[in-house]
Image (spheres, rainbow, N blue to C red):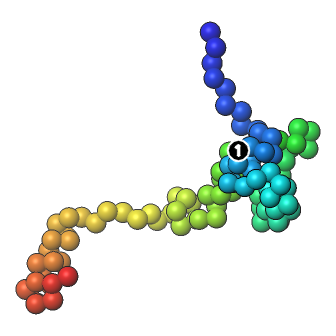
Amino acid sequence: MRFRVDPRDVPPDIAARRLGMSLDKFRATLPNLVARGFPRPDPDTGNLDLSAIDRWCDARHPHLFSGGPAMVARDASTVVQDRIAAMQRGSAR
């Protein structure tokens, strides 16, 4: 029996593709990325952790991925009441 195993640590060319970059652009940009907290390559393999890269990307948008307040759908009954009140005032939205 065979199981598909998706590697977590990948070579730089795959990490570059994850970020939508060519390998050359990734190598040139890596020092700046690391200075901004991007995960460093493993010292033994030179590979990069895709999960850590994804978390780094998420951290750039804390209002979306921090687990903090998220956009929540409004209660439809409240919306209807607000619209009816606005129509009665003559200022329909």
**Quadrant location, the N terminus:** top right
In the rendered image, which quarter is residue 13 located in? Answer: top right
The amino acid type of the residue labelled 1 equals: Leu
Q: Is residue 8 above or below residue 57?
A: above
* Left or right relative to 56: residue 64: left
Label 1: how many Cα within 10 Å (few below 14, some 14–19, many 20+): some
**Residue 67 at x, y = what percent?**
52, 58
Viewer-closest of 30 and 57: 30
Q: Residue at x 76, y 38 (%)?
A: 9
Q: Residue at x 70, y 48 (%)?
A: 17
In the rendered image, which quarter is residue 71 located in? Answer: bottom left
* Left or right relative to 88: residue 65: right
Q: Which residue is mark 1?
A: 50
Q: Residue at x 58, y 65 (%)?
A: 62
Q: Is residue 75 visible?
A: yes
Q: Kindly state the secondary structure of the residue where label 1 is placed.
A: helix
Viewer-closest of 44 and 77: 44
Q: Residue at x 81, y 46 (%)?
A: 12
Q: Is residue 39 visible?
A: no
